[in-house]
Image (tube, rainbow, N blue to C red):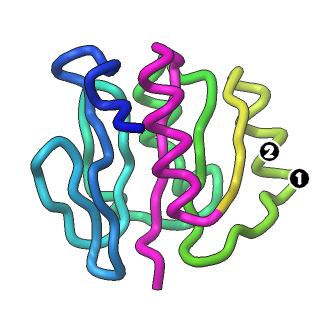
């Protein structure tokens, strides 16, 4: 099922992903990315830490961040989960493909979601 007709125009939709990067709303990004409803940026400090996710906190208005951690998901450290929860942000870690699909579904539901994505290497 194609969800793109359900997404509000102007929102960032993840169209493709590969070991080289991502295509989001027609723009190709090489490497890790942070995807928000209103913009996509390269994830310069692609580290699963509070510092690495500072752009998500700074963006504001995010209730859930999906972590796409390559070919396999990995657990989120309790310290990072606690730090994000203190800012009102939930976090879910999974493989990159699942994170991309989940992001698009939640975006179509107008949820306040962001995705921090590592290429599936």
SS at circle 2: helix
Instruction: Give yes or no for contact between labels 2 and 1 (Cβ–Cβ under 8 Å).
Output: yes
Q: Is residue 2 above or below residue 18?
A: above
Question: In this picture, which residue range is highlighted in magenta?
Answer: 95-121
Please provide percent x and percent y for residue 71: 58, 77
Identity of the residue drawn at 50% across and 16% down: 109
Please provide percent x and percent y for residue 90: 72, 32
Q: Is residue 94 above or below residue 106?
A: below
Asked if the stretch drawn in magenta spans residue 85, the answer is no
Packing grade of label 1 (10 A; few <14, some 14-19, many >=20) is few
Left or right: 89 with respect to 81? Answer: left
In the rendered image, which residue does mark 2 sit on? 81
SS at circle 1: helix
Q: Which mark is residue 78?
A: 1
Q: Which mark is residue 91?
A: none
Kindly give the residue lying farthest to the right in the view shown: 78
Q: CA distance from mark 2 to mark 1?
A: 5 Å
Screen quadrant of the N terminus? top left
């Amino acid at each position: 099922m194609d969800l793109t007709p359900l997404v509000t125009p102007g929102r960032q939709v993840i169209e493709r992903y590969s070991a080289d990067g991502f295509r989001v709303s027609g723009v190709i990004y090489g490497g890790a990315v942070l995807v928000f409803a209103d913009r996509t940026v390269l994830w310069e400090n692609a580290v699963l830490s509070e510092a690495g996710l500072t752009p998500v906190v700074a963006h504001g208005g995010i209730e859930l961040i999906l972590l796409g951690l390559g070919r396999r998901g990995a657990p989120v450290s309790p310290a990072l989960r606690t730090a994000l929860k203190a800012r009102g942000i939930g976090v879910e870690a999974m493989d990159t493909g699942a994170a991309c699909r989940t992001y698009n579904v939640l975006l179509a539901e107008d949820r306040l979601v962001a995705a921090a994505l590592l290429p599936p290497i």
